[in-house]
Amino acid sequence: MGEYMVQDRTWLEVWESDKASLSLDPSSSDHAILREFLAVAEVDLNKILKTIGVPTDDRDVHDNAYRSIHFILGFAKIMGLMKAAHVLAPADYLLDLGRKDGNFTRNSMDYVIKLSINTGLKIFHEISQSEICNLDTSEIIEECARYIKPLIEMDVIAANECQNIVYDPAP
């Protein structure tokens, strides 16, 4: 996902859905699925929050955190929770980036991941309580973008440098 997110940067922009109320009108079967999803997402997001900022050499911890956020973001999209999916996109990108080198401190990555996830948790909590979310996430998206844009530029530069390396098979 990381490469796609570098190319299409619309997720770093404020969307109309970030400012608008999110209200649900799910069918009874969707309602049960949504309730179960919200409960699982809350547990998994809180697990991720506990791992960020804790030094570890266990790559599985970072890989599992990324897989969890990626699943939650994708399922939120499927359920039509675009406000939640959008606000979780920065955490998804940064967890993918951070798991590759195990460094979550560059450009305050840990701060942005926590901001993104905590806001997602607020959205999920509001939805589970009243099936509506009036939280305006536009400032959160802007805050995350301020930190992420320089990381994307560094990532693009590093990728370009790797492409310029010539492999010489001669001994």
Image (cartoon, helix red, strand yellow):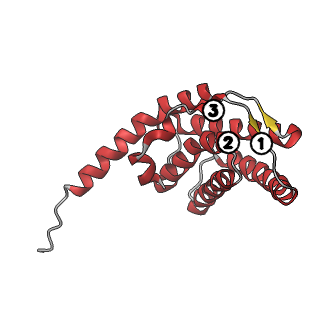
Gap in angstroms between the C-alphas marked 1 and 2: 7 Å
99 relative to 60 in the view: left or right: left
Q: Position of residue 98 (x, y in %)?
A: 50, 49
For the residue carrying disc 3, how many other residues have a C-alpha within 10 Å: few (<14), some (14-19), or many (20+)?
many
For the residue carrying disc 2, how many other residues have a C-alpha within 10 Å: few (<14), some (14-19), or many (20+)?
many
At label 3, which amino acid type do we have? Asp
Instruction: Name the front one of labels 1 and 3.
Output: 3
Q: Write the residue at 42% across / 39% down.
A: 151
Can you tell which mark lies on residue 73?
none
Q: Position of residue 69 (x, y in %)?
A: 64, 52
Q: Write the residue at 80% across / 50% down.
A: 38
Residue labelled with disc 3: 18
Residue placed furthest toward the left: 170
At label 2, which amino acid type do we have? Ala
Residue labelled with disc 1: 124
Residue labelled with disc 2: 84
Indicate the secondary structure of the residue bearing disc 2: helix
